[in-house]
Amino acid sequence: MSENYYLILAGGVGAAKLIEGLAKLIDPELLKIVVNTGDDIELFGLKICPDLDIITYTLADLVDKEKGWGFIDDTFNCLKVLKKFYDTGWFNLGDKDLATHIYRTDLFNQGYTKAQITDMICRNLGVKAHLIPMCNEQVETYIKTPTEVMHFEKYFIKYHCDPEVLDVEFRGINEALPIKETLEYIDKAKRIIICPSNPIVSIGTIIQVKNIRESLIKVKNKIYGISPIIEGATVKGPADKLMKCIGLEVSSVGVANYYKDFLGHFIIDNKDCNLKPEIEKLGISTYCYDTLMTNINKKQALAHFLMTLNE
Ligand code: GDP
C-alpha cells in the first residue's frame, strides 16, 4: 500500500533548489529526503557533511541563497585564524556554520550515529522534513588527477574542478548500509524524486549503498528524475568531467543511460526536447520543461510540474 509521503534522493546545491520549491507546495513533514554523504569530510578535527548541511539550512530558511550553501550573513573570522594553523583553510567554513560541525562532532564523540545526529540538528533548527543520510558508515569520494589523488572537496573547492579526472573512487562504499527507514520509504512512497544533482558523486553514491538500487528497480514506475544537464553542460559543478571520465555522454541521454535501470520518468529541459525520442527508446517516459531554477518562482513551477505529472 502506498503512503502519502514523497521520497527524494538528493545531493547538495542542485537538489536544494528543487527541495525549496517542493517545500512550498507540500507539507514538509511528507518529505523524506535521503541525502548523499559521499562528500563528507573531516577537517580541523570536525565532522563536516556538506550536502546534509545545504539541505538542512535550505529547509530551515537559513541558507545563503546567493552561494547556495552555508548560513546567510555568515562571517569567516574563525577560518582566518584556522588558516594560520592548518593547510586545509581552502574549505570555506563560516562562523555560524562552525557551530553545526562542533555540535555534530560532539554528538559523534558521544556515540550517536550520523542518522541520529541529523535528526537532532534538524529538530534544533526547526526542520520538519525527515532528512536521512544515505548511510551511517563513512564513505569518502576521491578523485584521481594526473598529479594527485585527492578528496572530492579539495578537487571541488581548492582546485575549482580544473584538473583532468582520471578516476573516481568511493572509499568505504562496500560497507555502506541504508538507514532502516530508507528501504521502507522506497517501497511505500507515493512518488520518488531524483533531484537534479550530480549523477556520479551525489545520486551515484546513494544508489551504490547496499540494496538501494535493487529496491528502486522494483518501483521504477513511480520514480521521477530531473536532468542536471542542460544543452550538454552542467549548470554548476563537475558533473560533465565525471560523466566523461566514466564513459558517459555529457547530455540528458547520458544521465538517462546511467539511471535507466530504475528511472521510470525523466524531465529534461525544453532546450533538450530534441533528445526525448532517444531517451524514450531506453524505456523512460520523458517530458520537457524549463528546469533552470534561477528564482523561487521557477523552483516552485518545476516542483509543481513534477508533482502533478500523471496525477
Ligand atoms: P552539489 O553536491 O552541491 O554539487 O550539488 P548537487 O549534486 O545537488 O547538484 C549538482 C548538479 O545540479 C550539477 O550537475 C548541476 O548541473 C545541477 N543543477 C544545479 N542547478 C540546477 C538547475 O537549476 N536546474 C537543473 N536542471 N540542474 C541544476
Image (spheres, helix red, strand yellow):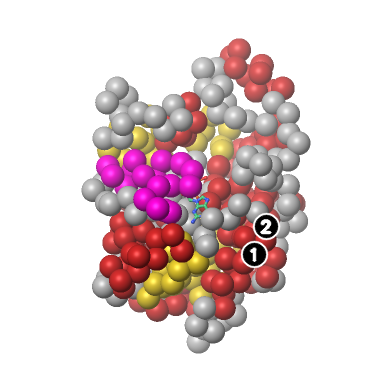
Q: Residue visible at 48% across and 47% down?
A: 235
Question: What stretch of residues is rendered in magenta?
Answer: 229-245
Q: Residue visible at 62% across and 67% down?
A: 301
Q: Is residue 237 magenta?
A: yes
The picture places residue 39, in percent across and down from the top left corner, at 46, 42
Which mark is drawn over residue 296?
Answer: 2
Q: Residue visible at 37% across and 75% down?
A: 285
Is the residue at mark 1 in contact range of ligand 1, meaning its CB lies under 8 Å from it? no
Q: Please indicate, yes or no, whether residue 265 appears anywhere in the rendered image.
A: yes
Residue 219 sits above or below residue 233 on the image? below
Which mark is drawn over residue 300?
Answer: 1
Which mark is drawn over residue 222?
Answer: none
| Nearer to us in this view, 113 or 101 | 101
Q: Mark 1 packing: few (<14 Cα in 10 Å), some, or many (20+)?
A: many
Left/right placement of residue 79 relative to residue 247 reads: right
Res 97 quadrant in image: top right
Which image quarter is the C terminus in? bottom right
| Mark 1 touches mark 2? (CB < 8 Å) | yes
Q: Please indicate, yes or no, whether residue 201 appears anywhere in the rendered image.
A: no
